[in-house]
Image (cartoon, rainbow, N blue to C red):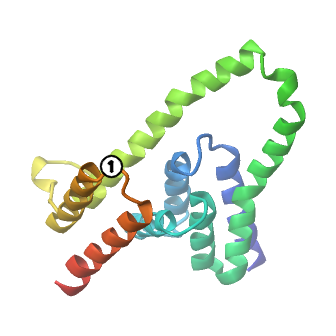
Amino acid sequence: MLIKLLELFITFFKIGVFTFGGGYAMIPLITDEVIAKGWETKDTLIDFIAIAESTPGPFAINISTFIGYEQQGIFGAMFATLGVILPSFIIIVIIAKIFNKFADNKYVIGFLNGAKPIIVGVIFSVGIDFVLSSVFKIKEITFISDIILDWKTILIFVIVFVLTKVKERMHPIFIVVLSGLLGYILFGIL
């Protein structure tokens, strides 16, 4: 058990160290690590991501807690969560101490400006991957006939998209509850 807990801690510590750009930017790294270790399937991981995004709190903490709990119960949740937050905590303490000294440094400014488009690209890539796997049920495209449309997912997406365009300042809680309710009706009842 201790070895598994340490593996959870080290895996999520590594994810925390090498992810720039917040929770969404860490999804590809989480996906690679968790699936490669056989901890979750891609479908289960997508469900965890949906739950982590729709529950209160930072995405990175939620997803690491879910995966850790799934693997080793409450201690797994604690070790995975500690692993993912510790690098950020250490880095932010160091930055807080030295940022004023380097805020005008051209290399620091260059790094930050260079990191922005990468973060956007990673988040965009994750979004495309989720659309392909959730809406079109594509695991790996070999032929165009492999594309299967999921009309229920598309319907939920269209309803939520139209509502957010008709009413510009729709509260996110309403959107999450509506999406969950539509999912319950379309996937659970029908």
Q: Please tell me whether residue 157 is drawn above or below residue 75 in the rendered image.
A: above
Say which quadrant the C terminus sits in.
bottom left
Q: Nearer the viewer, residue 138 or 159?
A: 159
Q: Residue at x 37, y 47 (%)?
A: 127
Q: Which residue is mark 1?
A: 168
Left or right, 60 with respect to 47, comes to right
Q: Secondary structure at mark 1?
A: loop
The residue under label 1 is which amino acid type? Glu
Percent from the top left, x then y, of residue 109? 69, 19
Q: Nearer the viewer, residue 160 or 183?
A: 160
Say which quadrant the N terminus sits in.
bottom right
Percent from the top left, x then y, of residue 110? 66, 17
Q: Please tell me whether residue 74 is drawn above or below residue 175 in the rendered image.
A: below
Q: Disc count in the image?
A: 1
Q: Residues within 10 Å of mark 1 (few under 14, many from 20)?
A: few
Question: In this rendering, does residue 78 appear at all?
Answer: yes
Q: Nearer the viewer, residue 29 or 52?
A: 52
- Residue 69, by quadrant, is bottom right
Q: Residue at x 82, y 22 (%)?
A: 102
Left or right, 22 with respect to 162, comes to right
- Residue 139, by quadrant, is bottom left
Percent from the top left, x then y, of residue 71? 60, 77
Q: Residue furthest top?
A: 106
Q: Residue at x 57, y 78 (%)?
A: 70
Q: Residue furthest left?
A: 145
Left or right, 72 with respect to 128, comes to right
Percent from the top left, x then y, of residue 97? 90, 36
Q: Residue at x 42, y 70 (%)?
A: 44
